[in-house]
Amino acid sequence: MTTSNLNQEIKELIVDALQLEDVEPAAISDTDALFGAGLNLDSIDALEIALEISKRYGFQLRSDDDENRRIFASLRSLASYIDAHRVTR
């Protein structure tokens, strides 16, 4: 899967998992912050996204992992982490 395809897939995952009815996946920037500014997501949203990542890509993000702040910094950083850790089927 290309980086562009993975980014699009994750955008769709975020919109679907969080039921963001007013957000089009294409409107999510690869580089904007997912939390705070940007999409303005919160910790509950992070848990929902992590659950969907676990279901779809076959690995779990640890909730106590200090690295999660870096992983969830932007869509690009999240996609990079998923690409490196997903279980291929």
Image (cartoon, rainbow, N blue to C red):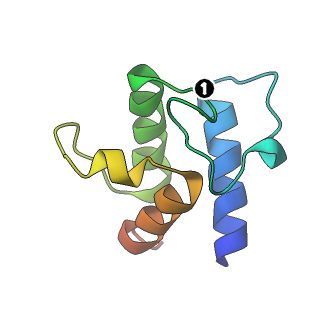
Q: Residue 63 falls in which quadrant of the image? A: top left
Residues packed near mark 1 inside 10 Å, few (<14), some (14 to 19) or many (20 plus): some
Residue 42 locus on image (x, y percent): 46, 23
Q: Secondary structure at mark 1?
A: loop
State whether residue 76 is above or below residue 20.
Answer: below
Q: Is residue 33 left or right of residue 16?
A: left
Residue 27 locus on image (x, y percent): 81, 43
Viewer-proximal residue among 54 and 38: 38
Q: Which amino acid type corresponds to the residue marked 1 in the rendered image?
A: Leu
Residue drawn at 33 percent across, 45 percent down: 69
State whether residue 66 is above or below residue 16.
Answer: below
Q: Where is the N terminus found, in terms of image quarters? A: bottom right
Residue 40 locus on image (x, y percent): 58, 26
Residue drawn at 41 percent across, 37 percent down: 51
Residue drawn at 44 percent across, 46 percent down: 55
Q: Which residue is mark 1?
A: 18
Residue drawn at 56 percent across, 43 percent down: 33
Q: Residue furthest front?
A: 37
Viewer-proximal residue among 88 and 1: 1
Q: Is residue 62 left or right of residue 20?
A: left
Q: Residue 47 falls in which quadrant of the image? A: top left
State whether residue 54 is above or below residue 79.
Answer: above
Residue 44 locus on image (x, y percent): 41, 21
Q: Residue furthest bottom?
A: 2
